[in-house]
Amino acid sequence: MTMDGGPQFLASDAAKPQYRPQTELVRGAQKRSDFNETSEALYLTSGYVYNTAEEAEAAFKGEADAFMYSRYANPTVRMFEERLALLEGAEDCRATASGMAAVYTALACFVSAGDKVVASRALFGSCHVIIDQILPRFGVKREFVDGGDLNQWEEALKGGAKAVFLETPSNPMLELVDIEAVSALAHAAGALVIVDNVFATPILQRPLALGADIVTYSATKHIDGQGRTLGGAILTTKQFIKERLEPFYRHTGPSMSPFNAWVMVKGLETLSLRVERHCANAEFLARWCETRDGLNRVVYPGLESHPQHDLANKQMTGFGTLVTLNIAGGKAAAFRFLNALTLTDISNNLGDAKSLATHPATTTHQRLTPEERTHLGITDGTVRISVGLEDVEDLVEDIDAALVAALA
Ligand SMILES: *Cc1c(COP(=O)(O)O)cnc(C)c1O
């Protein structure tokens, strides 16, 4: 970026990493202004000026790469988008105001009345609402399958589909979907595959390399990582962005604010360090919980007892930051457990430096019928823990004391 020559980096090639991923996370796609700032600049501007009327005309005709309006693109947002694309191995990225804006935009930009979406049943609540209730209002058909059952995917994809949507590991039971196998089935049926990769983070799982076409994030979670801002991202090919995403995105306005993008781009610098520590703490806690009384079940993809541990080993490079417990004694015991926590906070958020615990049956998944919850494996004793960055010994002591209270 130069101070007088107009914006020059709008179309820079996001897809070619020059360095190894950790280096790109710190340095990738930085655009220094003529002030030579060390840190990424926050371009808190909604609009841009043109040096001449001819320049404005060329920008609107699409003949010149120029920032025109921050609903379309913004330099700070571009730094975030390009840096995340480098990490993901995606050709390009568009940032959104929230994870849900990313999911809705990724689907709505290319499905039409009469098209069919096939999705795994175990989804983040609002993703389920978009596919089950909102898109059908516009004539989009949908079918839900048990994500771990390839026969169900195959059956649902017979007769074709426009899109496949899945989340792996899933919220809150940490079930996995075989991205490679489902992508092959989806492509044979003519569908594009969208993976909600929030629980795995871009550090632990690369859906595009496994055959998926589009990856979405809630950057609100691990990418911010400190619970400050909302954000989302869509990563895919330049062609899809140009032909499908951009025409929808520009005119419907799900854009990320420059301030939030600035928080997120700084979040990327420490993402792999944080995720590594989150995972180490989560695995330690999960293994300790397995030895502890008062639990019917400890769910963590890194445990040999996880039914899809082999698949986790195959498609992930780490096992995630969440641990789900099934506390013996149902809702009363689960509530005693939550109310006895003194360090871990009760919160439905996740991916924060602070450890957070939630009771899905009465919060995030209370909208479902008891039968639907049972089908997903969510019981009244289920507690989901987003394992934070505290000293793991303090976390273990906190969970230990809460389990004593739950058993009382
Ligand atoms: C949080 C979350 C979302 C939604 O993201 P927001 O930033 O809250 O809009 C979507 N999918 C998953 C798996 C999530 O955890």
Image: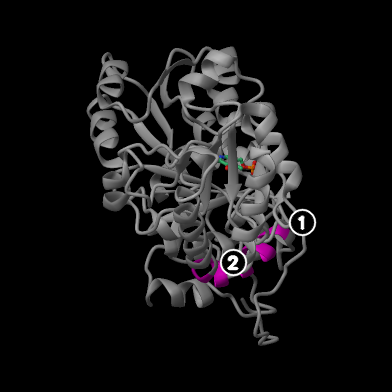
Q: Are marks 1 and 2 in contact (CB under 8 Å)?
A: no
246 in magenta: no
Q: Main secondary structure of the magenta part?
A: helix
> In the depicted view, which residue is nearer to us: 317 or 300?
300
User: Which part of the image, by quadrant, shows the N terminus?
Assistant: bottom right
Asked if residue 180 is positioned above or below residue 389 in the image, the reply reads above
Q: Give x and y (percent) for residue 111.
A: 47, 25
Q: Quadrant of ligand 1?
A: top right
Q: Where is residue 233 shown, x and y percent of the image?
A: 55, 49
Q: Which residues are magenta?
A: 260-273
| Residue pointed to by mark 1 | 46
Q: Quadrant of residue 153?
A: top left
Q: Is residue 266 left or right of residue 160?
A: right
Q: Which mark is residue 393?
A: 2
Task: Kindly identify the residue that appears in the image at 34 percent across and 42 percent down.
Answer: 212
- Element assignment for label 1: loop
